[in-house]
Image: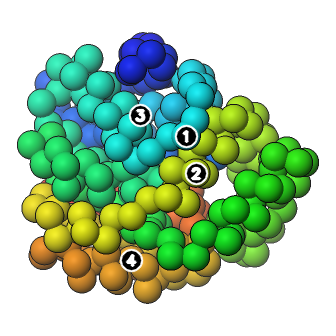
Amino acid sequence: MAVIQSDGCPLYVETQGPEQAPAIMLCNSLGTTHTMWNGQMKAFTRNFRVVRYDRRGHGKSGVTKGPYSMAMLARDAIAIMDALGLEKVNWCGLSMGGMVGQWLGANAPERIERLVIANTHYYYPDKDFWDARLRTIRAKGLGAIIGPNMERWFTNEFREREPEVIARLTEIFLATPLDGYIACCEAVRDMDHRELLARIKAPTLVIAGRYDQATPVDAAEHIRSHIPRAQLTLLDAAHISAVEAADDFSAEVLGFLGQAR
C-alpha cells in the first residue's frame, strides 16, 4: 500500500500481483472504497499487476474542498500512474469509475491500453435527482438515503441471499466523508461526456446490469454505439455488478483483456 499525493490530496493506493505483469487499474463507484473489488482480486492478480485506490473524498484518501470534476478525478488517476511508473494501464471502472475512464480514454489516450466501463453513464440532462439527493444528505446525512441506495445497487434476490455483503457495503457507504460524497455527487451531476465518446480509440468493453436502474441498459447502449468498435455485454445484476455477479464480471473482463481465468 502507498499514499500518493495528487494536487494536495493524499490518495490511498494498493498494488497486488506480479510487478512485471501488465497493469489493470480499478476505479470504484460513488460511496464505496477499493474493497469493492475484493471479488475480482484472486482472478485478476494471476496475470495482472492490479492497482486499486480510494477516490478523493472516500475511504482512506483525503478530502479536499469541492467542487470536484471528472477532469480533477482523472488527473488523480494519472498522478497514481506516474508515481507507480506506469506508462499505460488497462482501466476498469464501475459507475463513477466508468465516468473517469471515459474522460481518460478521450483526453489521455496514451495512458489507456484497453478500457472497461461498467454500469455507468455519460450525461444527466435532468439534474433534479442529484439536487434532491444533495439537499437530503446536507440536511440529514448519508443515513437518510441508505435504504434506497442499496435497492438501486442490488436486486432484491441478492439482498436477501447475501445479507453480510449488504451489511459490509452499508458500513462502507455510511463511513464515506460527507463533504467528499457531496463533492463527488456534484461531479457526477455536472458531467457531460457526450462529445468525448467518439474520441475514445482504445478497445472498449461496456458492461451493463440487466436490472440496473441507476445506470440503465439504454445508457450503456448509447455509450457502446458512440465509441468506435466498442463491445457491450449484459450481466444478471443491478448496479454494482462487480459484487453481485463477481465471477461473471471477472470472466468478461479477463476475456476482453485476452487472459483466461
Residue 21, horizontal then vertical, whole percent: 16, 31
Residue hosting label 2 = 186
Visible in this render: residue 37?
Answer: no
Residue hosting label 1 = 67
- Look at label 3 and name its amino acid: Arg
Marks 4 and 3 sit apart, C-alpha to C-alpha, by 23 Å
Marks 3 and 2 sit apart, C-alpha to C-alpha, by 23 Å
Return the residue nearer the eye: 203 or 101.
Answer: 101
**Residue at coordinates 24% horizontally, 82% vertically from top-left?**
225
Marks 1 and 2 sit apart, C-alpha to C-alpha, by 7 Å
Q: Earlier in the sequence, mark 3 or mark 2?
A: 3
Answer whether labels 1 and 2 touch (C-beta < 8 Å): yes
The mark lying in front, picked from 4 and 3, is 4
The mark lying in front, picked from 3 and 2, is 2
Answer whether labels 3 and 2 touch (C-beta < 8 Å): no
Residue hosting label 4 = 220
The mark lying in front, picked from 4 and 2, is 2
Q: Earlier in the sequence, mark 4 or mark 2?
A: 2
The mark lying in front, picked from 3 and 1, is 1
Mark 4 residue element: helix
- Look at label 1 and name its amino acid: Pro
